[in-house]
Image: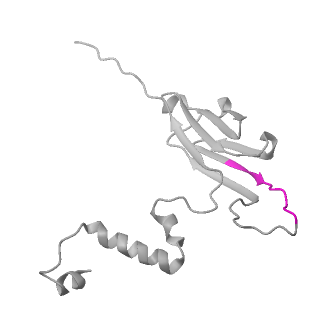
C-alpha cells in the first residue's frame, strides 16, 4: 500500500484508510468465490437457526427461527452461563425428477451454543414455540442482577 501511494505521489488523492481494506476484501471475494464474506460481519452460510439474544434487568431472552420444527424435535440445555440448542431439520425429499433452480434450504443436524454475559437461574428457564419462533426466557441468577445501593447521609 505504501509503495502504491508513493509511486503515484503527489498526483494521488489521500483516501480513507479503510478504502484499501475494502479493495483487498473485494479481491479476496472474487478469488474465493465469496467465502471471505463470512469473516467480515455477514452471516456465514449454514448458520441455523438464526438467533437474537436480548436482556432486561431480570432475564435474558433468546429468540430463534425454527420454521417447520416441532418442540419435541429440539434439545435445550442450560448450565451456568451457557445455552445449548440442538436438533435436526428434516426437509421432505423432492421428486427424483425435480430439477432445482435454487437450493438454499438444507436438512441435517444443527447445534448452537450461546455464552451469556452472566449466570442464569437454570431452575426457572422457560421455553415456548409459536409460529416457528422459539422463545427461551432465562432468568438471571440473583448474583448477576443489578443491585440498587442506597447512600446513607452522615
**For this rendering, which residue is in front, 136 or 66?**
66
Name the residue at 88% across, 68% down.
96
Q: Position of residue 26 (x, y in %)?
A: 42, 73
| Residue most extreme to the left | 10
Q: Is residue 72 above or below residue 44?
A: above
Q: Position of residue 37 (x, y in %)?
A: 49, 67
Instruction: Indicate the quadrant where residue 122 lies.
Output: top right
Q: Does the magenta-highlighted stretch encompass residue 46?
A: no
Is 30 on the left-hand or right-hand side of 92?
left
Q: Is residue 104 above or below residue 20?
A: above
Name the residue at 68% across, 61% down.
104
Instruction: Indicate the quadrant where residue 141 lies.
Output: top right
Is 92 on the left-hand or right-hand side of 117?
right
Q: Position of residue 42 (x, y in %)?
A: 50, 59
**For this rendering, which residue is in front, 89 or 105?**
105
Q: Does the magenta-highlighted stretch encompass residue 90?
A: yes
| Residue most extreme to the right | 96
Total marks placed? 0
Q: Is residue 14 above or below residue 112?
A: below
Q: Position of residue 58 (x, y in %)?
A: 52, 27
**For this rendering, which residue is in front, 85 or 90?**
90
Name the residue at 36% across, 21% down.
149
Magenta stretch bounds? 85-95
Q: In which quadrant will I find the C terminus?
A: top left
Is 134 on the left-hand or right-hand side of 51?
right
**For this rendering, which residue is in front, 62 or 121?**
62
Name the residue at 34% across, 17% down.
150
Amino acid at each position: 500500500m505504501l509503495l502504491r501511494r508513493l509511486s503515484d505521489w503527489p498526483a494521488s488523492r489521500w483516501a480513507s484508510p479503510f478504502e484499501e481494506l475494502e479493495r483487498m476484501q473485494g479481491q479476496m471475494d472474487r478469488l474465493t468465490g465469496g467465502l471471505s464474506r463470512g469473516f467480515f460481519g455477514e452471516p456465514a452460510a449454514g448458520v441455523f437457526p438464526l438467533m437474537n439474544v436480548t436482556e432486561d434487568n431480570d432475564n435474558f431472552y433468546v429468540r430463534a427461527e425454527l420454521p417447520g420444527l416441532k418442540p419435541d424435535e429440539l434439545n435445550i440445555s442450560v448450565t451456568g452461563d451457557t445455552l445449548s440448542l440442538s436438533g435436526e431439520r428434516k426437509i421432505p425429499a423432492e421428486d427424483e425428477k425435480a430439477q432445482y433452480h435454487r437450493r438454499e434450504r438444507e436438512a441435517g443436524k444443527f447445534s448452537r451454543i450461546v455464552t451469556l454475559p452472566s449466570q442464569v437461574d437454570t431452575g426457572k428457564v422457560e421455553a415456548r414455540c409459536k409460529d416457528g419462533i422459539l422463545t427461551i426466557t432465562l432468568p438471571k441468577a440473583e448474583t448477576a442482577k443489578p443491585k440498587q445501593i442506597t447512600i446513607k447521609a452522615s
